[in-house]
Image (cartoon, grey):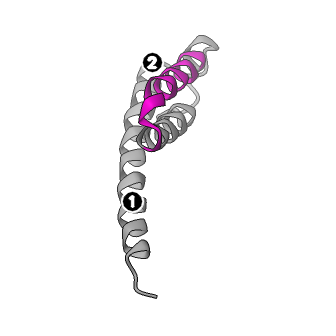
Amino acid sequence: RWGFPSSHAANAAAAGTVLARMFPRWRWAFALLAGLIGFTRIYVGVHYPGDVAAGFLLGWAVGLLLWQMTRSGLKRYLNQKV
């Protein structure tokens, strides 16, 4: 209705993915929060379920990519000789 994919769902999934990697003990809380954000987009009628699902998939993929890029860059930075 408003856009495909849902950017709210994508942002929530990306942030949740990165935070879950940083704080694995809290991963279910981050997943629940992202799920609630997606649900509200459908509930208020601004997105169809497919929009939200596509946003979650996109956000998850971007979150994993950011995590890998940040982690490898951080390792290189920390291993540099001073």
What is the residue that sits farthest to the bottom in this orientation?
A: 82
Identified by mark 1, the residue type is Arg
Q: Label 1 belongs to which residue? A: 71
Answer left or right for 31 relative to 46: left
Label 2: state its secondary structure: helix
Quarter of the figure with residue 56: top left
Calculate the distance from the C-alpha at mark 1 to the C-alpha at mark 2.
33 Å
Q: Is residue 43 magenta?
A: no
Residue 1 at x, y percent in the picture: 55, 24
Mark 1: few/some/many CA within 10 Å (<14, 14-19, 20+)? few
Number of numbered discs overlaid on the protein picture: 2
Q: Label 2 belongs to which residue? A: 49
Nearer-N-terminus badge (1/2): 2
First to last magenta residue range: 22-40
Q: Residue shown at 40%/82% (left/top)?
A: 80
Q: Residue shown at 39%/59% (left/top)?
A: 71
- Which of the pair 74/43 is nearer the observer? 74
